[in-house]
Amino acid sequence: MDRGLHVFLLTALAAVASLPGIAAAQSAGEPAALPTQQPQVVEPAVKRRDVEPAAIDTENFEAGAFVGTVSIEDFGSSLLYGARIAYHFTEDLFAEATVGSSEAGKTSYEELSGSAELLTDNERRFTYYDLALGWNALPGEVFFGGKRAMPSAVYFTLGAGSTTFAGDDHFTVALGAGLRVLANDWIAVHFGVRDHMFDSDLLGKDKLTQNLQVSVGVTAFF
Amino acid sequence: MQDAYADMRSGPGRGFPATYSVERDASIQLLRQRTDWIKVRTAAGREGWVHRSQLERTLTPGGAEVRLAGPDPEARTEHRWEVGLGTGDFGGANVVSVNGAYALTSNLLVRADVNHLLGNYSNGWLGTAGIAHVFVPTWRVSPFVGIGGGVISISPKATLVQAEDRTDTTAYAGLGVRGFLTNRFLLQAEYRSYVVFTSRDENEEIDAWTVGFTYFF
């Protein structure tokens, strides 16, 4: 007996067995109500498998450190080091908090005059923080040789913060640009430039100072 | 996979080249997520980044839909936490502001912020807490009003004579507008009128405004 016929017979048998009410009603001469649902023939023995998907690691934070050089206007260039933490909102936008510290050198005047010191050692410390919004403007790949390609992005940042220098806190606007190269899935290398702009009246007259920073950093996504 | 196919890119962004694609009914393993991109591995061992939208309809072997973390249109009204950065002017001094909010309802926010004040003659810190009412949170651009209070601490610069550090309490009433850039990201501008309760004979009134961006969690 083929499968189709088998199913048909089973269905018919089940239908007859499940309709004693109709049979009784018909025998009493009253109009019959048609069944509105097909009766279930086979109770499915398959249990739905509940699969819990593995919790996917979302990595939108990025934190790391950088080292570089900063040219403090009128005070020469000095070694700079700092730390940054970023949160990536979308593939395009991120927020970034940066802190950095350096020790200013001497002005040309101080070097030439030999003795007159404009600032104490404590006042020469140049520290800053800034909070910035970043934009990954040019995503792409960086190629090393013929076989190796690393995802990268050129980004721009616009931030505001404060710079402590010469015994005073200065409101600072920081414009930056950088290249982020992903060494693997979670480690990135940054090459960046940043201009810290603030007003200073240190040398007698109010002026907008430009303090340019060049840095190399490493960050980890987590 | 339930989509007809999904592009696998070399990096987590639409600007990265598509290096491979997976077809319908293929089995993939989800490895990690960065913003809206998910790194996947195919049965053959190929790896690449696929956009969230192409995986939303992917089914697990049990038939349940995979739920992926990420922004959705409901985030505008159903979010709970907001964090933002801003800058502006506080009675002539520059301000750097970090702020946070918790949404009690889609209209009513409990807010707090910390502000670094950087002026020509004095520097200081201002911390406030308050509430804000957003008129129509579903609109792309919506006005809001807020009130609150806090503490302000001012240190005049060392070059001034007879300078004294002052710490006073303050209260504000504010008015602002916020506009969505994406479902989770908005720009915000606010004006606040502060009254500083000084220990001198007269209270001090200060106008302040800030602009900034805010992100929903």
Image (spheres, helix red, strand yellow):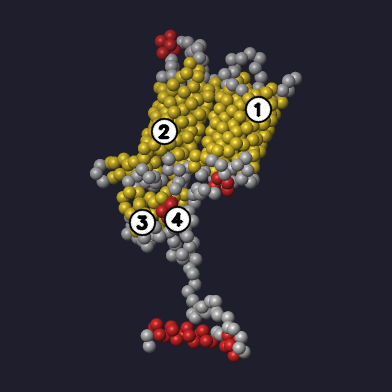
Residue topped by disc 1: B193
* Residue A11: percent from left, percent from top: 47, 83
* Residue B59: percent from left, percent from top: 44, 61
Residue topped by disc 2: A156
* Residue A38: percent from left, percent from top: 51, 78
Q: How many marks?
A: 4
Q: Are marks 2 and 4 on the same chain?
A: no
Name the quadrant containing residue A157: top left
Q: What residue type is labelled 4?
A: Glu
Q: What element carries label 4?
A: loop
Residue at x 45% of width, y 55% of height: B56
Q: Point out the tag, 1 or 4, that comes first from the N-terminus.
A: 4
Q: Which amino acid does label 3 sit on?
A: Tyr
Residue at x 67% of width, y 34% of height: B147
Q: Do the residues labelled 1 and 4 touch (CB within 8 Å)?
A: no
Q: Point out the tag, 3 or 4, that comes first from the N-terminus.
A: 3
Please report, as a chain letter, where disc 2 is located.
A
Looking at the image, the residue that sits furthest to the top is A113
Disc on res. A145: none
Q: Mark 3: few, some, or many residues within 10 Å (few <14, many ≥20)?
A: some
Residue topped by disc 3: B5
Q: What residue type is labelled 2?
A: Phe
Q: Mark 4: few, some, or many residues within 10 Å (few <14, many ≥20)?
A: some
- The quarter of the image holding the C terminus of chain B is top right
User: In the displayed structure, would residue B126 be above or below residue A7?
Assistant: above
User: In the displayed structure, would residue A139 be above or below residue A199?
Assistant: below
Please report, as a chain letter, where disc 1 is located.
B
Mark 3 or 2: in front is: 3
- The quarter of the image holding the N terminus of chain B is bottom left
Task: Report the Cα–Cα distance between label 2 and label 4.
Answer: 31 Å
